[in-house]
Amino acid sequence: MDPFLSYDLYFTAQAWILALFVLAALIQLISAIDDLMMDLMALACKAGLKPAENCRRYNLHKLLSQSTSEKPLAIMMPAWKEAPVIRKSVTRLLSVVSYRNYKIFIGCYPNDSDTVSEAIDLAETYPNVEMILLPHDGGTNKADCLNHIYSAIKSRATVVEQPFEAFILQDAEDVVHPYAFRVCNYFLDQYDVVQLPVVALPRSWFDLTTGHYQDEFAEMHAKELVARAAFSGLVPGAGVGTAYAAATLSRLGDEVDIFRNGALTEDYDLSFRLHQAGARFCFPRVYDRQRKGIGTRHDLVATREYFPDSFYRAVRQKSRWTIGIGLQGWSQLGWTGSFWLRHQLWRDRKALLCAHAAPASYAALLLLLWQKHMETQLGYTPHAFLPSSQFIWILLLSNLGLMIYRLVLRGYWTWSLYGWGALVTLPLRYGWSVAINYSALLWANGQYWWSRLRGKPLTWVKTDHNFPDESVLKDKPPPPRPGKKQP
């Protein structure tokens, strides 16, 4: 090869690799600045500069001292292959919840005989449990199951003396807080949609996969959703611990599918549609300072559950969230609404672009290292690893500083829920979360565009669930509160 040609090719390739590295660093910086803006928004809420009643902190006992009559509540629990956990979950819910005026509706598929058998036995044992058998085999998707549960409940409203005034979403693996329904009941007097926080139950301190869920949900539900509720007035549904006033759902008119059929994050989609219909959202953070347990430092009234503890299961679950929130959300909801609502949409979709920045920058660094090795092989005069450009070094140092800041802030939110012991492997969990989230993004894009190419709908991406033992929960629930009989 002509040495001059090889020399030109070498430095042309180096220029392109360096350009890729700078572009990736710029995207990372833009994303980090956006995260910083959200931190400032949350700080404004905490300092009272942006007062918002729909995302305040409350003392549980002061809140419950204000008498409120119990509304009849319908608990909707879609179940597809949940036989291992549904009995434990439902029986615990029935024994701990300090509320009387509710009924649980479990939606099952005919071809899921194990779950059907468990649901039938629960319905025969407890008068406020009923199984809804779907007319077709599963699993289709969660939205389809919820629509059939909702339709069955509405059809029963004509034959009961007291129709349900609110609907609450719970999953078969949920650990429901003893006072969750009473808190929802209280805020439904003032709001149309109430979303309780969601908390990941801890496993072993060295479990990086479950641990990264702890970190992400601690930050999301203590900071992100607070700022979103205050500035945009909308709290995206978390799929569990979400209460809808019956009158609010009726605002959608005579739609056959209250939950958009085919949407993999039907709760998220419904939140935006209800917001467009004028619904008022609430994200209360209620603490019981007199009782501690359930694996956290303070007994926050929240929905708790075990999240996946393996890389593969976490990627599958997060790919469903990425499809529903990012890809389907973009296609079905567009970019409408106020500035703050559009910013919320950007927050939910920016990973479709920004998530590629970190792997691209790592790849560029590896290529630059390889090129430095090739310099000696080709006999070229060694050059600096990176140019002495002030812009590049300011960019790199800014990203490094913001990454350390993000790690410290995430550590604060994790510590606030799980204590000092949860911080031991925090840096490792942070890097592990990048790998999980990026793998989920790639998988989600493959699933989504392949389904579009074939013209076939996406089906239920099933996550295997576990339910904790009482020794893990460390919680002695109060006896059920006396009150009205269930409808």
Image (spheres, rainbow, N blue to C red):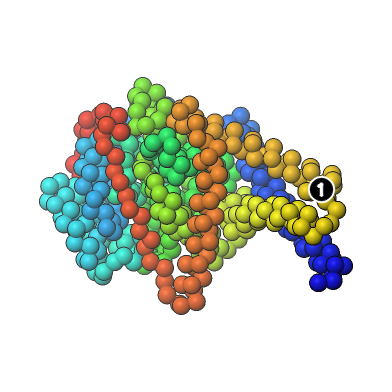
Res 300 → quadrant: top left
Q: Is residue 418 visible?
A: yes
Q: Residues within 10 Å of mark 1 (few under 14, many from 20)?
A: few
For this orientation, the residue located farthest to the bottom is 454
Asked which quadrant contains residue 224, the reply is top right
Q: Residue at x 45, y 28 (%)?
A: 421
Q: How many marks?
A: 1
Residue that protrudes farthest toward the left in the picture: 124
Residue 404, position in %: x, y?
64, 36
Give 342 or 280, whichever is nearer the viewer: 342
Left or right: 138 as drawn, with respect to 336? left
- Which of the two residues, 376 or 35, is positioned nearer the viewer here? 376
| Residue 279 makes an appearance in the image | no
In the displayed image of the protein, which residue is found farthest to the right? 4
Residue 420, position as x, y percentages in the image: 48, 26
The residue nearer to you, when weighing 355 against 379, is 379
User: Residue placed farthest to the top in the image?
Assistant: 290
The residue depicted at 54 percent of the width and 33 percent of the height is 411
Give the image location of residue 324, x and y in percent: 48, 60
Nearer to the camera, 453 or 198: 453
Q: Amino acid at mark 1?
A: Ala
Look at the image and tell me in which quarter the N terminus lies.
Answer: bottom right
Left-right relation of 366 to 259:
right
Examine the rendered structure and indicate whether residue 365 appears above or below residue 138: above
Residue at screen point 40% across, 30% down: 296
- The residue at 34%/28% (across/down) is 293
Asked if residue 484 lies left or right of residue 401, the reply is left
Residue position for label 1: 384
Q: Position of residue 260 (x, y in %)?
A: 42, 64
